[in-house]
Structure formats: C-alpha cells, structure tokens
C-alpha cells in the first residue's frame, strides 16, 4: 500500500470528525449546510465565534462532501476556537482537522498558518517552522506568514532564517508592532544596538510593565551577544549523534474516526393490519352402553350425545396510536491510540470495557467475556532509519441498542476492524481504510384508494422510513520513539524551509543577498536561550485574521 502524498507529520492523526459520513455523492453535488438551513446561519455562527453552534451544520455539510478541504478547515477551526476559550483538550481535534484540510487541499494557506500556531503552542518549533514556510511559499505577500516563520526560527535557534523572516515581515508591514518586535529580537541576538529603537517603536502603544519587560529583555540579549570576530569565527556546533543504523523500535499513531447517523420517520396506522377473524368448528359425538342385574334380571341402557359448535370471533386488538413519530440516533467516535512495538514482536493495545455474557449449556452455563472498545495490534516486519514495513490491526466496537430476534437477553455489538500491511516513511500518514455507506429503508402499508384520502389515511395507511449513514476512516502515522529521534539542530531544516530559502532571492525578496546572510549567521553563536514570553505566538490582529480565514474558506467551499 502506498502512502498518500504528503503530510510529513510525526504525530498526525488525521481526520476528524463527526465529520466523516457519506462521500457517496459527488463533491459539491449538494450545498453542504442545507441540513441546517443554508449557508447564512452557518456563516453567522462562525463569525460570532459560536463554535459549538456551527459544528452541526459543518458536520452535515461534510457528510455530503467529505473531500472538501475548505469545510474540513472550518470544522477544525471550531475545535481550535473552543481550545482557545479554555478547553485545551480540543487542540488534538483541531490538529486532526487541519491535517485533513491539507490532505484534500495541500496548499491551503490558512490551514498551514493555523497548524503553525498550534505547533508553536505545543513547543514543536521544527514543525511550526515548516508550516509557516509552506504558507510563505503559497502567499509570499502575507506578512503574517513571515512573522510566524520568524517566531518559530527564533525559538529553535535558526538565526539565519530569523533574520530573513524578520526583514521580510517588516518590509511588508512596516507599521505593525508585531513585525517591529520580531525585528528587534532578530537584531538583539546579533548584538545590533538598533534593536533598542525597534523595540521602542513596537511598544509605543503599550505601557507600564509590559513595555518595561520588553526593553529589559532586549538589553539582556544585547549584553550577552556583542558583535565580534570571535562570534563569527567560532566553529559550528558538532553534528548531533545519529541513531543506530538499524532501529529496532517504532511508534505508530492510529486515528479511528466513526460517524453513524440513523433517522427514522413513521406516519399513520393501518387499522386493517391488526384486524383478524377466527373461525372455529367443533363436532363431538359420544355414546355409552351400560348393563345391570337386579334379582337375577339383567337390564341394559344406552346413552348417546352429539355436540356441534361453530364460532367466529375477533381477537383483542392492540394498536400504537402514535401517528406521527420522528427519531434520530447519532454515534460518533474519534479514537487516537498510540503504540510502540519491537521488530519481529507483536504489541497489543486495548482500551474499553469487558462485558461478561451468560451462555447457557446443557447442564450448566458459563460467563463469556466480550471486549468492547478500541483495540490496536502492531507487528513491525522491517525498520530502517527512514521507513518501516509493518502489519497493523485496528478495531473499534460498541454496544448497540438494536435487538435481534425475540431473545429476552441478548447483546448487539457494532464492530469495525481493518488489518493491513503497509510500508511508508516515518512521519507520513496513510489512509488505512475508509468506508462511506448510505442506506434508505422505506416501507408502507395501506388500504387501496381509501388510504390515499387525506385525514382518513392516518387510520388506513402506515408508512415508515429509516435512513442510515455510516462512515469510517482509519489513518496510521509511524514514527521513531522519542528516545531514538535525532536531537534538534537549527541547521537541519525541513523540506519547506529549505525550499523557501532556495527560492528566496527569486520569489520573496529579489534584492537580498541570501547567501551572504546565511553564511554569516550560521556561524553566529548566541548566548542565552529564548524565553517563552519573548514573542507572542499569534500576531496581534488575530481576530481580523480569523474573520478573513472564515470568509475565504466559506467562499471556496461553496464553489
């Protein structure tokens, strides 16, 4: 099985959602969001940041068009918004959704940006730098992309990219306080006294303690880093140690996304369905002979009787007079188990409940355990420094309310399972299996002609419809365990960052001498480590940025 292009993530976990459901209709075939009344209510909910209120409409839209990357982005944005309001557990869901958006629309600028912000908040600066570099390649005129790139470069110690990104952000937005602040820190780590003026300009509208902290931090960096030959001529740090040539352990992240919706509709009752006539006929004949002797005289007697009965009866009738009934059942699961395995050995993971079910026998019964939950089995077959071949089994089961047959005691369990052997590089994500199913079951019973008369049809016609939509998506992402991963090296840049640097003079800033800047700053030794509060992860105008992202992705989703 070949991996899908792309998404070079170590911990993906891909696609989200209650979002999965029927992809059986062609993309864009139906206007998504029609289940909740159209686009305008959805747009209004998103713009007023009613994230929970926007989710049902987006989920309904995605059931019609699962491969719409712009809808995937908006769905992820709702989880991101809830996380920023305090529910930090939703960050995983947001990350999954943004990765789904990038899978279906690889050059989605907003998905790259939002994922970069998430990576910054999680301290994964390598990944954040790669995301912002991809965003800058897509839209090189957006200063926000270069701001994010500069922030990620600052925290991971990539001084050359920090200088380039800060210069470009300041060129594109010379009046933006965040761009000026970034340029100030870029100058301070190089020992440039001009950083003081840049920080003063950035904090001109800020007062009190915040301004004082920023100025003191710049002074601290300037005192630690003075431009001099010893800094420039210092040898570069030794290359970090590489892992063993043949790693024998691996880690795999599996994402199981299930969405199940069952809608039921019942109208009317057909009284004749329960009407039964019973006819019975019984013919009984009996004959008895008897004899007796009294004083030597024998006497005999005969008796005979015949009973014929015939009966026509109507048994007791029971009707359900709930003439109008709608029902809806929804079940959604997003499970993200992770498991480490050793080469040639199988690892097993289970999370859930064990139900003990009584099974009767001829003479006695027994209790049989049934596992209900998430199970993951992993068996690596070959591991190299860059890729792995492994056998994986992922399953999810749950108890259903449906009963089969007329058993007094029974359990119905819904189960999805997939087994496959895959070969892919570390950090790549593979769709292991996908299922989209839509079932419509309609039944009706009526008295001919009379069942079509309005009003009377409620008593002479019964119609029921059941619509079931099931969708399942299972994704896997292998990676090396943290103990075997390479230590961070600022000079070991990811693919998008290298591509951006290679195209800088032609695509981003034709007048800059990128080669000289990189050669000079890659030898620079900076004393003192960046502190978490030095640069904000998100630019100050993030609300306007959020509104722009919503409007643009809604417009593209409707096309």
Image: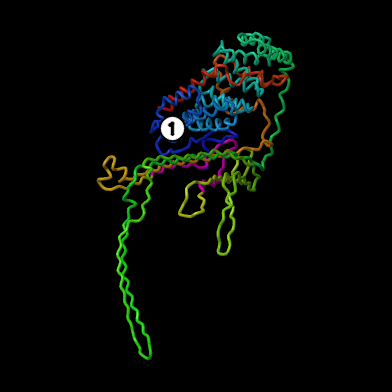
Q: Residues within 10 Å of mark 1 (few under 14, many from 20)?
A: many
Helix or strand or loop: what does disc 1 sit on? helix
Left or right of 385: which side holds 289?
left
Q: Which residue is mark 1?
A: 61
Viewer-proximal residue, 400 or 249? 400
Residue 498 visible at all: no
Number of numbered tags placed on the structure image: 1
Q: Quadrant of residue 301?
A: bottom left
Viewer-proximal residue, 386 or 397? 397
Image coords of residue 184 (percent x, y): 64, 13
Classify the position of the C terminus by image quarter: top left
Image coords of residue 539 (percent x, y): 57, 18
Main SS of the magenta part reads strand
Image coords of residue 105 (percent x, y): 48, 30
In the rendered image, the vertical position of residue 241 relative to residue 512, given as above or below = below
Left or right of 376: which side holds 530?
right
User: Residue drawn at (68%, 10%), measured in percent from left and top?
Assistant: 193
User: Residue drawn at (43%, 40%), measured in percent from left and top?
Assistant: 327
Image coords of residue 124 (percent x, y): 63, 28
Viewer-proximal residue, 405 or 249? 405
Q: Is residue 357 magenta?
A: no
Which residue range is magenta in the image? 413-440
Q: Quadrant of residue 453?
A: top left
In the rendered image, the vertical position of residue 175 relative to residue 515, given as above or below = above
Residue 442 visible at all: yes
Q: Quadrant of residue 531?
A: top right
Residue occupying the far front of the picture:
295
Q: Is residue 422 magenta?
A: yes
């Amino acid at each position: 099985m070949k991996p899908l292009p792309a998404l070079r993530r170590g911990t993906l976990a891909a696609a989200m959602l209650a979002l999965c459901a029927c992809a059986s209709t062609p993309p864009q075939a139906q206007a998504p969001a029609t289940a909740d009344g159209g686009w305008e209510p959805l747009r209004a909910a998103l713009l007023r940041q009613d994230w929970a209120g926007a989710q049902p409409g987006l989920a309904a839209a995605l059931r019609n068009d699962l491969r719409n990357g712009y809808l995937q982005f908006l769905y992820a944005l709702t989880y991101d918004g809830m996380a920023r309001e305090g529910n930090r557990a939703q960050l995983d869901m947001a990350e999954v959704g943004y990765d789904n958006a990038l899978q279906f629309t690889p050059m989605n600028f907003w998905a790259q940006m939002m994922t970069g912000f998430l990576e910054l908040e999680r301290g994964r600066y390598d990944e954040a730098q790669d995301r912002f570099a991809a965003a800058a390649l897509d839209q090189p005129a957006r200063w926000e992309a270069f701001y994010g790139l500069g922030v990620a470069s600052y925290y991971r110690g990539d001084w050359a990219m920090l200088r380039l990104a800060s210069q470009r952000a300041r060129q594109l937005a010379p009046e933006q306080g965040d761009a000026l602040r970034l340029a100030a820190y870029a100058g301070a780590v190089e020992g440039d006294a001009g950083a003081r003026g840049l920080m003063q300009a950035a904090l001109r509208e800020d007062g009190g303690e915040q301004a004082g902290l920023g100025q003191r931090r710049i002074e601290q960096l300037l005192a630690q880093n003075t431009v001099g030959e010893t800094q420039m001529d210092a040898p570069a740090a030794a290359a970090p140690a590489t892992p063993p040539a043949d790693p024998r352990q691996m880690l795999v992240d599996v994402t199981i996304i299930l969405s199940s919706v069952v809608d039921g509709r019942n109208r009317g009752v057909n009284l004749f369905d329960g009407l039964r006539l019973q006819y019975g006929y019984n013919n009984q004949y009996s004959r008895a002979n008897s004899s007796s002797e009294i004083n030597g005289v024998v006497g005999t007697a005969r008796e005979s009787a015949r009973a014929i009965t015939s009966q026509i009866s109507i048994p007791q009738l029971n009707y359900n007079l709930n003439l109008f009934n709608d029902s809806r059942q929804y079940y959604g699961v997003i499970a993200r188990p992770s498991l480490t395995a050793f080469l040639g050995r199988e690892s097993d993971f289970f999370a859930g409940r064990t139900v003990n079910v009584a099974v009767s026998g001829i003479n006695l019964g027994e209790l049989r355990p049934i596992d209900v939950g998430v199970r993951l089995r992993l068996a690596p077959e070959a591991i190299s420094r860059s890729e792995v071949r492994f056998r994986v089994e992922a399953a999810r089961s749950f108890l259903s309310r449906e009963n089969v047959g007329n058993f007094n005691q029974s359990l119905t369990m819904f189960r999805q399972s997939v087994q496959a052997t895959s070969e892919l590089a570390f950090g790549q994500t593979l769709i292991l299996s996908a299922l989209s199913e839509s079932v419509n079951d309609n039944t009706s019973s009526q008295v001919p002609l009379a069942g079509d008369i309005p009003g009377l049809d409620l008593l002479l016609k019964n119609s029921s419809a059941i619509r079931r939509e099931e969708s399942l998506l299972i994704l896997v992402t292998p990676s090396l365990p943290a103990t075997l991963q390479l230590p961070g090296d600022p000079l070991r840049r990811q693919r998008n960052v290298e591509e951006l640097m290679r195209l800088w003079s032609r695509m981003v800033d034709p007048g800059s001498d990128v080669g000289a800047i990189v050669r000079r700053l890659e030898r620079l030794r900076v004393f003192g480590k960046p502190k978490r509060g030095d640069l904000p992860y998100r630019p100050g105008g993030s609300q306007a940025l959020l509104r722009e992202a919503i409007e643009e992705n809604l417009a593209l989703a409707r096309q």
